[in-house]
Image (cartoon, rainbow, N blue to C red):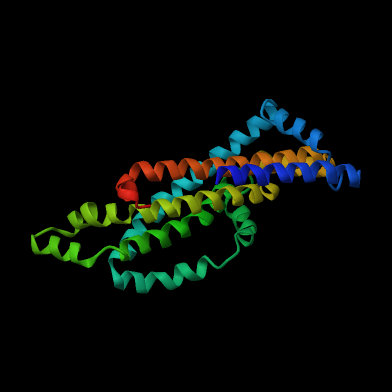
Amino acid sequence: MKFYSISVLLAIMIIWYFLAKKIDNNLLLPDFILTCKEFFKSWIDSYTVQNLLITLERVFRGFLIACIIGLPLGLIMGYSKPILLAVSPIINSIRQVPIMAWIPLAIVWFGLGDGPTIFLITMSAIFPLIINTIDGVRGIDPNYINAARSMGAKNIDIMLDIILPGALPSFLTGCRLALGLGWMSVICAEFIATSKGFGFILVEAQQRLETPKLYALMIVSALIGFSMDRILIILEKLLTSWRFKNGNS
């Protein structure tokens, strides 16, 4: 699988190199070598690194807030059918609103800076967490819960000993989706609602017509998003190692 991925990547690079030479227009498709130089430069440029760290901090703060709200809410909704029936229409309605539509309201509520960006990250991340946690809880065999109740287990014991561990794999899958959406939404929010961050320097490169730098920063963004996803996959395997024993995955 890795061989095929590397082969496709090399093919894209070769096509890019010759196509850029053929077009000979850096505004449309920048020179491949020049873009590579900008890519490596971005990792050591203090201005770029500083803004990247600002964005990462916002992402993790928004993601943490989404987890703090989304996990317990998903557990409660999955465990209690009346609460699920009462709350799910509201959640399903709110999550249909495009994330960009929240930007004007977020600026009104929080002003410019960290506030609206963290809010947008939270709004992007919270719904996958809630929905996946609900699915995880609803997928638990009811016989486990009934057996625990027959032995006198209280609701809190059932929640901690059966529901939470049983829903953990689905919750971690939701974390992967949530973090990816949070990363994409913060870049969009920083286009408009802030004067610092990785999205802001993307806009700067676009306004200055620095297309090689713009392409390089987009590649950096893709690599960071990919890296965060891989880290969560490793974390998922560590926390739910029982799922991967005996060839199960």
Give the camera-side residue of 48 and 118.
Answer: 48
The part of the image, by quadrant, that contains residue 11 is: top right
Left or right: residue 202 compared with residue 121? right
Picture coordinates of residue 78, whole percent (x, y): 32, 65
Residue drawn 34% across and 50% down? Answer: 247
Residue 156 can be seen, yes or no: yes
Residue 194 can be seen, yes or no: no
Left or right: residue 155 compared with residue 90? left
Give the camera-side residue of 243 and 28.
Answer: 243
Residue drawn 78% across and 46% down? Answer: 15
The part of the image, by quadrant, that contains residue 77 is: bottom left
19 over 33 or under it: above or below: below
Picture coordinates of residue 167, whole percent (x, y): 32, 56
Give the camera-side residue of 97 and 168.
Answer: 168
Picture coordinates of residue 91, whole percent (x, y): 46, 67
Residue drawn 61% across and 46% down? Answer: 4
Q: Count all numbered tags in the image, as a single digit.
A: 0
Residue drawn 44% across and 73% down? Answer: 89
Picture coordinates of residue 177, whole percent (x, y): 50, 54
